[in-house]
Image (cartoon, rainbow, N blue to C red):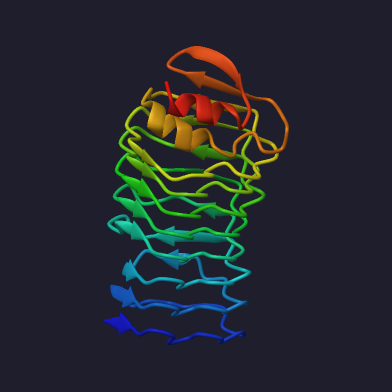
Amino acid sequence: KMIGNNAFANCKNLRRVIFSGEVKIGDFAFTECQSLESDDFTKATEIGKFAFYNAKKLYHIKLNENLNKISKGMFMNSGLIVIDLPKNVEKIDDMAFFGSCLDSITIPKTCRSIGDKAFENCEDITMINLCNGLKLIGKEAFKNTGIESIVIPITVSEAGTMIFADTKNLKKIEIKGSDPFVLNKILIGAGNHKKTVDVMITGKMLEYNDKMAFILEII
């Protein structure tokens, strides 16, 4: 069974959806459904991009445990506060949670990549738990979030720039790896509010500001 692209887009009075069996959900299927309160999507084996864009009353959602991707912009600008990511998720695509109302999230150990701007503008989020196994963090992934501290797993081998730009509450970054080029990209922008950010790299503590990124690049 399939719910096609844009199937319920802009149905602003739609509150509940009940599935009788497994279903695939297309792109933009529930975008702009601003009254949508249904939280049980455990029968959806695939969910397309921007499926819940601007669904302001979708505060909580349950997903199929076999879902392996959080698609591009899936919860962008939604009211989502609580989500337990399926244990089989391998990819969180670009802008997946951009501007949502999440307060915390744990990324499962199966996840290999977090896309560009995945959590940008999630101003209420204070905790993002990253697990070993993660390899890529995209550019501006945590820009303008409310996180105060974060641990970057040793498995991260690729990173975009400005990951922590405008994270005004950020006080501590612990980086388990030591590749100077990866460190440089992770740290660029982390000190752009003229506040001290403690950075722990393989057990050594130092204070960071933007200029240090250029030092790390030539070590």
Is 79 or 184 nearer to us in this picture? 184
Number of marks present in the image shown: 0
Is 62 or 125 nearer to us in this picture? 125
Identify the residue shown where x is 30% and y is 75%.
Answer: 23
- In this view, 35 is above or below 93: below
Q: Is residue 157 rendered to the left or right of residue 106?
A: left
Residue 89 visible in the displayed image: no
Is 20 or 44 nearer to us in this picture? 44
Residue 216 visible in the displayed image: yes
x and y percentages locating residue 85 in the rendered image: 41, 51
x and y percentages locating residue 214 in the rendered image: 52, 30
Q: Is residue 206 rendered to the left or right of residue 83?
A: right
x and y percentages locating residue 74 in the rendered image: 46, 66
Give the quadrant of residue 146.
top right
Give the quadrant of residue 1.
bottom left
Identify the residue shown where x is 53% and y is 72%.
Answer: 53
Identify the residue shown where x is 52% and y is 78%.
Answer: 31
- In this view, 101 is above or below 37: above
Identify the residue shown where x is 41% and y is 71%.
Answer: 49
x and y percentages locating residue 81 in the rendered image: 59, 55
Give the quadrant of residue 182.
top left
Is 181 or 122 nearer to us in this picture? 181
Residue placed furthest toward the front: 218
* Quadrant the C terminus occupies: top left
Residue placed furthest toward the top: 204
